[in-house]
Every structure is written in C-alpha cells, then in structure tokens.
Image (cartoon, rainbow, N blue to C red):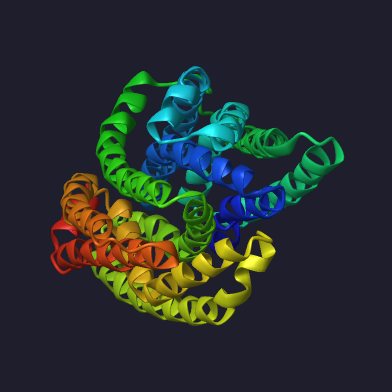
C-alpha cells in the first residue's frame, strides 16, 4: 500500500498538469501531450536507475551485507546525476527538431516546445528520484517514498495553479512548477542516501566498477524500456495523424493509463523488493509462492480498476476539458482501456518479478518481440479508414488489448520456468 501511494504521485503530477492545462484550450493540451510523450520517453529509458538499484540493494540485504547494499545505492545516485545532466542539456537543445519529428505544427508546436524546454531542469531531479526510491525500496522501505511523494504532489499543484493562472505563464508555468516540486523531492532522497551511507561508514564517492556493473544490467533494461517507449510513441504518432481532437483525447487517455499503470505497478515494486530479497537469501520456494500470490492480486486489482474506470468514463472528461468532441472521443478510449485492466495487472506483476530476479536480458528480448507483434496492429488501424472517435477507439484496442496481450504471453511463459529464479540467486 505505501508503494501504491508513492507510485501514483508521478501520474498524479500528470493528471494535475493535464487538468490545469486542459482548461486553457485544446492547442495547449495537445502541445503538452506531444511534449510529454518526448519527455517521458527520455525519463522512461532511465527507469532502470530504480529497476536496477532496487533488486541490487535487496539482494545485498538478503545476503546480510548492508554496506554493500548502500554502496550500490550510492552508485545509482551518481549515475542518475550524470545521465540526467547529459539528457537535460540534449533535450533543451533538441526540443524543436524532436517535436517536428512528432508532427507538431502551429500553435500546438509552440506550446509543446515551451513545455518541453522548461521541463528539462526537472528531468535531472526525476532521475535522482528514481535512484533514491530504488535504494529505499531495496531496503524494504516504501513508507518514506510515500511521504515524499505526497508532499511533492501537493507542492506541484500549488505551484502550477499560481504559475499558470496567477502569473499567466500558460504551459511554461506548468513545466516550471513541476520541475521545482521534483527538485524538492530529489533533495530529500539525496540527503537520505547520504545519511544512510555515513551511518554505516560507506564512502560517498562513486565506485566506477559498481557504476559499470549497474550500467551493464541497465543496458538490457534500457532496451526493454526502449521497446515500450517506441510502442507508446508510435501510438502517439497515429493519434497525431487523426487530428487535434483525437490527439488531445489520446493525451488524456494515456495520462489516465499511466496513472492506473503506476497504481497497478505497486505490486510490481513489491515484487522487485521481495523477490530480490528472497532470492538473495536463496529462498526459491518463497519466491515462487510470492509470485503466485502477487499474480492473483494483479488480476484482481486490474479487474477492480477496470470496473471503476468503465463506470466513470462518460464523465471523466469533464475534469480535463470543456470541449465536447474531446470528451466524446475520450469516453470511447477509456472503455477500451477499462477492458484491458486485468491484463495490465497481470503484466505489471510479472514484469516486477522478473526485474527483481535480475532477468533483464529476457525482458529486453521479449520487449522487442512484443513490439514486432504490435506494429502490424497499428498499421491495420491506419488502413482501416475509421474516422472521428471510432479511429481512437480502434487505436486503443490495438494498444490496451493487442499489445498488452503480447506482453502477457511472453512474461507468462517465462514465469512458468525456473530459469529466472536461478539467475536471481546469483
């Protein structure tokens, strides 16, 4: 439950931003949608900073080697700082050509560029947050990230309201407010990691061998995440081709999908920490039982969120936009998304189990296979000739049902074997 609360903070940032920006106009909302797709591609590729740190720290804890666990966490924080700085500078300089590639035009392009550039400072903080939360989760502490996330979410809303409506900074105010909130959260994590390290006599200077080891694991996780981001970007490109109304509705649907994904991912985070610790202690039987239990929870939680989403879908758009066409298209997309929630719950749990076991290579290869299965579905949507809300409905059917089913199949087949447990015990 604490992991659930902490995880939904970031998508709550997006929901709050979308609600605040959505009432400025369709062009502003569509621009933020495109910029967010680019931004979260970069951030998403770096999620290995949490996904590699959590199991590394948890396995060391399982072995009873706390100083080694903290050293791994420290190296993750240093790696986050270096990668975040490089990505932020590159993203600021390349904002316009990147958004041109995404098909941004006119007012939508102007707002997208503003939002993306002013989000770059927060990107460094976001990567530090990944590493910091990875350390604490590996130490089996999910309550502290919940407190930090809750405070950050509150600060984010207050800043955005003041900057967007009080100072009339439009989408720039939304990006600046979120960046400030993210840096406040990152500062807390950095101070906590430093305090833990000093208490146990662990040097604060990086161990470049440890960073290289994390990078090796991270390269497979990055490939796995890259396949996910390509799938999402390809979906955004298809929505862009359907026009501003469908693009705006797609942005809202994807924001809600992200919120629900992070909520379901609470079980995956629990899986990463618990599976890593059990395999580190050579308790394979306990790891198998945990996997069965969390899989059942994933399916059940997905079913509950699906029913709730289907019930509120006709009215959800009122929170984000006053445009009737956008709300109508959004409703259709959300009904499809609701139908796919049990599949998503199953997928996210098994994803967390295999990450916790260190089975990064398989996840990367499976990701490429899943993407190869999804792209023909997108082509079929394009060739269908559907228009209006129906086009967005078929697009979300391809993503929420087709793509997620491919992921469920590849993950389920792997989880039925014992190979991932053998990997995780080393």
Percent from the top left, x then y, of residue 104? Answer: 47, 35
Percent from the top left, x then y, of residue 373? Answer: 17, 56
| Any part of residue 235 in sight | yes
Q: Is residue 366 above or below residue 168?
A: below
User: In front here: 6 or 312?
Assistant: 312
What is the count of numbered marks?
Answer: 0
The residue that appears at 61% across and 57% down in the rendered structure is 143
Given the current orientation, which residue lies at the most extreme right position?
166
Residue 58 is left or right of residue 106, and the answer is: left
Quarter of the picture holding the N terminus = bottom right
The residue that appears at 33% across and 32% down in the rendered structure is 214
User: In front here: 183 or 167?
Assistant: 167
Q: Quadrant of residue 198?
A: top right
Residue 164 is left or right of residue 422, and the answer is: right
Q: Quadrant of residue 57?
A: top left
Q: Quadrant of residue 38?
A: top left
Q: Is residue 16 above or below residue 206?
A: below
The residue that appears at 51% across and 23% down in the rendered structure is 88
The residue that appears at 62% across and 35% down in the rendered structure is 186
User: In front here: 418 or 42?
Assistant: 42
| Any part of residue 199 in sight | no
Q: Is residue 334 above or below residue 195?
A: below
Percent from the top left, x then y, of residue 47? Answer: 42, 41
Percent from the top left, x then y, of residue 72? Answer: 41, 34
């Amino acid at each position: 439950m604490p992991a659930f609360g902490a995880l939904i903070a970031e998508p709550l940032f997006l929901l709050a931003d979308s609600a605040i920006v959505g009432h400025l106009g369709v062009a502003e909302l569509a621009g933020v949608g495109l910029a967010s797709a680019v931004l979260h591609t970069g951030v998403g590729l770096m999620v290995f900073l949490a996904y590699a740190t959590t199991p590394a720290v948890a396995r060391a804890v399982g072995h009873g080697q706390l100083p080694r666990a903290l050293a791994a966490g420290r190296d993750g924080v240093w790696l986050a700082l270096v990668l975040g700085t490089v990505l932020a500078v590159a993203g600021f300089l390349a904002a316009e050509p990147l958004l041109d590639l995404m098909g941004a035009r006119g007012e939508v392009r102007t707002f997208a560029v503003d939002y993306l550039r002013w989000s770059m400072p927060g990107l460094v903080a976001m990567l530090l947050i990944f590493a910091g939360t990875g350390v604490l989760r590996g130490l089996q502490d999910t309550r502290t990230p919940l407190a930090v996330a809750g405070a950050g979410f509150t600060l984010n809303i207050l800043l955005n309201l003041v900057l967007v409506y009080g100072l009339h900074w439009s989408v720039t105010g939304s990006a600046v407010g979120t960046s400030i909130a993210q840096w406040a959260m990152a500062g807390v994590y950095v101070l906590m990691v430093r305090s833990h390290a000093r208490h146990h006599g662990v040097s604060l200077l990086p161990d470049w061998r440890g960073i290289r080891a994390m990078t090796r694991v991270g390269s497979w996780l990055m490939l796995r995440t890259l396949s996910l981001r390509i799938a999402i970007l390809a979906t955004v490109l298809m929505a862009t081709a359907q026009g501003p109304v469908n693009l705006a509705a797609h942005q809202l649907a994807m924001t809600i999908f992200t919120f629900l994904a992070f909520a379901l991912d609470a079980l995956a985070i629990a899986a990463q920490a618990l599976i890593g610790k059990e395999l580190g202690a050579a308790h394979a039987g306990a790891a198998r039982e945990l996997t069965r239990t969390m899989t059942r929870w994933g399916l059940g939680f997905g079913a509950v969120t699906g029913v709730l989403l289907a019930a509120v879908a006709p009215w959800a758009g009122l929170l984000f936009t006053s445009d009737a066409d956008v709300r109508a298209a959004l409703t259709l997309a959300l009904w499809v998304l609701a139908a796919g929630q049990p599949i998503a719950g199953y997928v996210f749990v098994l994803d967390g189990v295999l990450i916790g076991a260190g089975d990064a290579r398989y996840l990367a290869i499976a990701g490429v296979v899943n993407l190869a299965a999804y792209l023909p579905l997108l082509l079929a949507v394009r060739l269908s000739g559907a228009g209006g809300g129906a086009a967005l409905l078929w697009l979300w059917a391809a993503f929420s049902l087709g793509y997620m089913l491919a992921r469920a199949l590849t993950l389920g087949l792997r989880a039925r074997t014992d190979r991932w447990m053998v990997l995780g015990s080393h």
